[in-house]
Amino acid sequence: MKPLNCAIVDDDEIDRLTAVAQIRKYPELHLTDIFSSSIQALEKLNPQTIDLLFLDIDMPEISGLELRKKLTQIPACIFITSHAEHAVESFELDALDFIVKPIKSDRFAHSVSRITTYFEMREKAELFENTIGGDTIYIKDGHEQIKIKLHEILYLEALKDYTLLVTEQKRHCVLSSLGNLLKDDRFNSFVRTHKSYAVQKQYINKISANELILKDKRSVPLGRAYKEGIREIL
């Protein structure tokens, strides 16, 4: 995958410099533009040349949320803010991730992993196909059809308009949102644990404060709004 062209928009100089330092650690990210306000970005940014935005939310005159609405032609966006309460609204704008300041290296690394996976999946563009009955579905990978057993899927992870189907051996991607998959009766054994995750119930082994531990020791995030529902199911 070629390096992704990135732009930063943040009105705080220290936060801008921190984001710059993090981005420059990763050869898969190519920082092309840095702006200190949304107005400056709207005046000077060429959306056709940008793959990914890193946006502060709390900015004067035009917030990062409003700026994203004006730049929807840019494929992906990461919101970086001091206010965690903006998380829900940011995901409603199909944010790829949401980072709370101050930026920590391990948390930024997690975002980069989501970024690269998302763009790799966009290039691959696997399609979700009809089930052949019972526990089996097909997905399209290029010109090939791959058969997957539903009971082998550990969890689902949303990546904007795509969803990762994660098994013990491999991750597959389908061109369908997480919300649409969960409306399908074939996925009724999955329970939502987070805005971006759903887990197959029988694989949940342990609940901690902010995550679920699965039977194979993997962990997935547990959102505050989903905790009570998970406890009732278990």
Image (cartoon, rainbow, N blue to C red):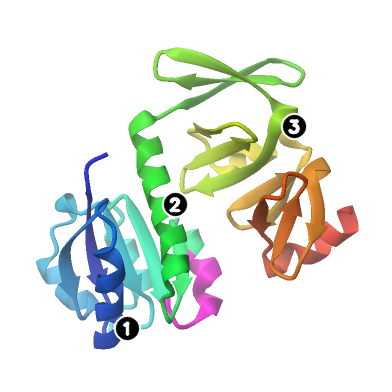
Q: Which residue is mark 1?
A: 59
Classified by dominant secondary structure, the portion drawn in magenta counts as: helix
The disc at residue 114 is 2
Quarter holding the N terminus is: top left
Q: Please, what secondary structure does the residue beneath circle 3 have?
A: helix
Q: Nearer the viewer, mark 2 or mark 3?
A: 2
Q: Nearer the viewer, mark 2 or mark 1?
A: 2
If you read the primary sequence from the N terminus, does the residue marked by circle 2 or circle 3 appear first? 2
Quarter holding the C terminus is: bottom right
Q: Residue at x 38, y 63 (%)?
A: 78
As drawn, 105 above or below 234: below
Q: Magenta segment, which residues?
A: 81-90
Horizontal side, residue 50 vs residue 199: left or right: left
Local crowd at mark 1 within 10 Å, few (<14), some, or many (≥20)?
many
Specify whether residue 12 is in view.
Answer: no
Q: Are marks 2 and 3 in contact (CB under 8 Å)?
A: no
The amino acid beneath tag 3 is Asp
Q: Which residue is mark 3?
A: 185
Q: Real-space Cα distance between discs 2 and 1?
A: 25 Å
